[in-house]
Image (cartoon, grey):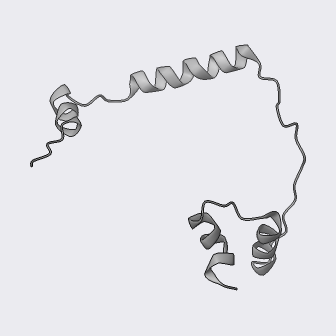
Amino acid sequence: MSTDESSHGKELNGQSPSLSSLSRIADAGGLEVQMTLRRENPKLDPAVCGERLAQVLALADALPKRPAAAQGDKAQFRIEP
């Protein structure tokens, strides 16, 4: 198998490895892959989405914040002629 045909090569070329590639990799490792079809566009429950958003925002609020000076230092770039 050439580099271009390997899963790593496909990822480097912006392609996703195929299902048959996944099956061969799993088989080589002594594993079995089972898949279940799902709806392509499941309807989202607004209440569940709202609760998840609230949890994410609460987590973000609870994380320690960097001092403003530290944030500013990383945002400044100088290009010298």
Above or below 58: residue 41? below
Total residue callouts: 0
Q: Residue furthest right?
A: 37
- Nearer-the-camera pick, 67 or 8: 8
Residue in front for this viewpoint, 37 or 64: 37
The vertical placement of 34 against 66, above or below, is: below
Rendered image quadrant of residue 51: top right
Image quadrant in which you'd find residue 55: top right
What residue appears at the point 61 percent right and 80 percent down from the top-left corner?
A: 3
Q: Nearer the viewer, residue 13 or 22?
A: 13
Position of 12 relative to 78 (above/below): below
Residue 54, position in %: x, y? 56, 17
For the point 66% across and 61% down, the residue is 15
Residue 60, x across and y down, in percent: 43, 26
Q: Quadrant of the N terminus?
A: bottom right
Q: Is residue 66 left or right of residue 63?
A: left
- Judge from the rendering whether residue 62 lies leftward or rightward of residue 53; answer left or right: left
Where is residue 42 shown, x and y percent of the image?
Answer: 83, 29
- Which residue sits at x=77%, y=22%? 44
- Image coordinates of residue 9 in percent, x first then y, are 61, 72
